[in-house]
Amino acid sequence: MGGQEFGAAVRQLRESTAPATVGLALGDRRVPGLRREELADLAGMSADYVRRLEQGRSHPSAGVVNAIARALKVGRAEYERLCALAGYAAADGQVPNEVGPGATRLLERFADTPMFISDSAMNLVAVNSAFLALEHWTLTGNPWDWNVAWRTFCDPFDQFQQSDADASDHEAILVAQVRSTLLRYPADASLAALVDELRTHSRRFDALWRAPRPVAAYESSATFEHPDGHSVTLVGSLLAVPGDDLTALLLTAAPGSADAARLAEVVGAADGPAVVRVGQLGPG
């Protein structure tokens, strides 16, 4: 990664960090956030060095990255991101899978839209009742039952159908997600095991892993066959959940369409809690 990206990330974090969060008085400030001098003092370096970092004119050591992360009291996901931008593997880096307040609010506020939250390795960690109402996510007892990439390439759902074009887009998106995650979390043993399983059991995944397709848009269409005999065609849109390194998938129908009416019927019959924790992260 270039120094410009790391520097921009440090500046954004500095300017969005409330002084009280790091034990400083608010005082008389023209703009919110921390001054460069304050970050420098907290991190044990000069203000001029912080300026050079933010301008991309100096490449940080792993120790400097750690010092800045500690000074700003960033969460694990932001620490992992800073390490990746600086070109380092975070010590003991594991794929974050905690469903924070932001992801929880998404599931709660879009109660009529099928949605799941996954970690960046595409392991489902939470869903809403509208998603469960589609009744397509059957479990087989496989350790990777809740991983979208595994279910797509190695154990596809009978009730989930896509055209060749949409299936190709869907596969390219999943490979891109998993590749990016492995680069950011090289020390995660469960993630490494997932990649090995996928490459061993799916020739299609292995081929895309060796020669990835570019991803133009992070969405594709699919038809869900409901157990009551009816079907509904929805578009799945993949969205990032900033800060937590999670991903949200929303399934929507064209407004005013027969699929929209059918989706409302299926979701209207659903009950249960707004947020359901699910998933498992591979063997063990």
Image (tube, helix red, strand yellow):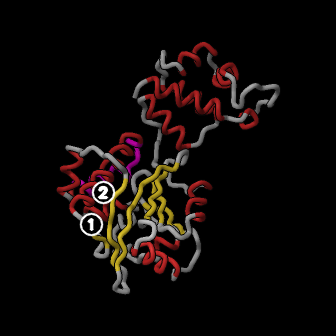
Residue 46's place in the image compared with 19, above or below, is above
Q: Are marks 1 and 2 in contact (CB under 8 Å)?
A: yes
Give the structural element (helix, strand or loop) at label 1.
Answer: loop
Q: Is residue 250 found inside the magenta-colored segment of the image?
A: no
Q: Circle 2 sits on which residue?
A: 170
Residue 186 in magenta stretch:
yes
Which disc number belongs to residue 162? 1
- Residue at 43%, 51% (x, y): give it: 120
User: Left of 147 or right of it: where is 200?
Assistant: left
Say which label, 1 or 2, has the lower sequence index.
Answer: 1
User: Residue flagged by tag 1: what amino acid is it?
Assistant: Gln
Measuring 58% from the left and 17% from the top, which residue is drawn there? 51
The image shows residue 99 at horizontal and vertical percentages of 56, 57
Above or below 132: residue 228: below
Q: Position of residue 40 (x, y in %)?
A: 65, 20
**Marks 1/2: CA distance?**
9 Å
Rendered image quadrant of residue 109: bottom right
> Which circle marks residue 89 in the picture?
none
Q: Quadrant of the N terminus?
A: top left
Q: Quadrant of residue 89?
A: top left
